[in-house]
Image: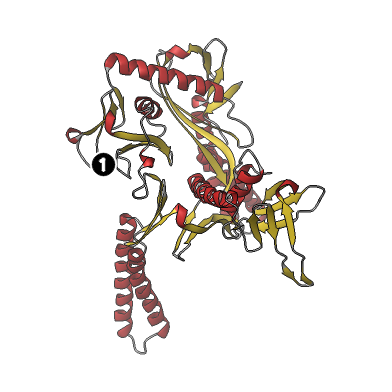
Amino acid sequence: MRVLVRGGYNSDNLFVCCIGFGSVGAIVGILLYFLAAVPEYGLWIASAGAVLLGMAFLRFLSLRSQRLWLEDLEENEFRLSSHRRTVELNDADLVEMTTNVSTHFENGVPKNGKRKTTLLLDAPEFPVELELDYKWPVKNNDPLAELFERWHTAMMTKAEQELQTEGVLVGTNWSLTRDDVSYQPDGKAKADEESVPIRDIAAAEIVDRKVCVWAEGEDLPFLKVPLGTPNATALFVLVNKFIVGKPSSAANTKGLGRVIFERNAGWTKAAIGAGIFFGLILIVGGCLLIFVELQNRPPTIGVYFLASGLIVIGVGLPIGGWLQRTNLLRCHERGLHRNINGKITDLRYEDIRSFTYTAVRHFYNGAYTGTIVTMECISFEGVTTKYTAKFKNADDELDNLRDHVSRVIASTMFKKLEAGQDVPWTNEMTFEPEGIDIRGRAGLFGKTKDQFLEWAEIDNFGMDQGQFALFAYGEKKPVYQTTVATPNFFPGFYCLLMKRFSTPTTPDQAS
């Protein structure tokens, strides 16, 4: 299958905008020229539209010269073709590859898969690096997945050979040998490289689209390498080969363990600095307005209100930035760490009684403005930790964190259930050793009757648009419904899967 991997017209914002605004300007301008009382206005608008259409044509020629198609052939071969030439190459001609797969969103909803790739080929037709960028519908698979998987395997083999023959594998600001990992700490010069012996490395994992490497006894990774940079995946694979069979540091129950997720929703130093700068400008502007207005007789009250508003906003910007300087959520192997401007709360998963996760998309006048994600944990002792942040699109890592925390809590719930104890789920549901006790709900026409559903009577479940439904055998309607934003829903959901269904599924895969 031939896939356009560079130079797509509809994905180029400049081309699309020039075509759209240029066409509208030309049409409106022509209509105004013939119909309006002042035809010069129409002429100006039509001229502006013509300029934009001319820019679109020039952009079209530029994109046309860049268009490139990639096709997977048999026998470890592939074909690159443009409007000028077609070249067939072998996988052995691939010198280096970096690739990054992400999700493209529209109005906060996943729309397309997206792959960005850089190829370096040993081919005279392509003397420089090739930048590839293409999309595919999220409901379909990547049309070139098999080709990139083949290339990935070839790059891994090449990296191992390079390590054996040259003794070193080099990446961006790091290098790997069979003895150690050397790296350049942030903010330090090349001469200040540090190294960690392989024997002292505890783990290498992919977290938040970065290859993270930990030293023994350390919660934070000493090295973070973004996926898509040279040899990043090879670093992950080879380090794990070197430390295979090594006991996990998770066996040490002291502390919360390694960091596997981190988000800081607080203001950055740059944002705080900008807040102070603009705040001072507003304060000075407000004071100048008051000073000038004092010279007038009589003074204008509205100007004083405007100046006061500027001063209040100017004072509020730096204060707001300072109060929001740290809003950190850190997920460890065995618990959560929360830091709000120096106020630290550590909560182990085994001590969490209730875990609530909500993600609400927000719109303004029909336009998507972002997703508000809220997570709240309550311990058995009543200690509450809450995290709220706004993201432009859904955050896969936050969903992974939700599932990780939920599974750990569900494991504790499941152990209690297997030991013969009753385990509360939602306000209306309780897990019991023999089944699920469902309490009736009070409604407009009275309270519905209580139900008890044995484990063997549970048929299936459904989840759609944030609503969960539980079905029993022989029943067309669900015996219980609730929103996924219900406190402790996700831990109970995974406990239900562990007890009733043999193959746990993620909420996004539920049907």
For the N terminus, the image quarter is top right
Q: In the picture, which quadrant includes the C terminus?
A: top right
The residue positioned farthest toward the bottom in the image shown: 298
Q: Which residue is most to the top? A: 75
Q: Mark 1 falls on what kind of element?
A: loop
Quadrant hosting residue 447: bottom right
* 315 or 456, nearer to the observer: 456
Image position of 94 with respect to 439: above or below: above
> Image point 30% across, 56% down: which residue?
269
Q: Residues within 10 Å of mark 1 (few under 14, many from 20)?
A: few
Seen in the picture, residue 239 relative to 355 is either above or below; the reply is above
Q: Residue at x 41, y 34 (%)?
A: 227
Q: Which residue is mark 1?
A: 186
**Does the rendering let one see residue 296?**
yes
Residue drawn at (67%, 58%) of the image: 482
Q: Position of residue 400 (x, y in %)?
A: 50, 45
**Residue 188 coordinates in the image, percent (x, y):** 21, 40
Q: Say whether residue 497 is left or right of residue 397.
A: right
Residue lying farthest to the left in this orientation = 191
Residue 327 x, y percent position in the rendering? 38, 58
Going by the image, does 381 lie left or right of 482?
A: left
Residue 493 percent coordinates (x, y): 61, 50
Whether residue 248 is situated above or below residue 30 in the rendered picture: above
Q: Quadrant location of residue 230?
A: top left
| Closer to us: 10 or 105 | 105
Q: Amino acid at mark 1?
A: Asp
* Residue in the foreground of this view, choosing between 235 and 506: 506
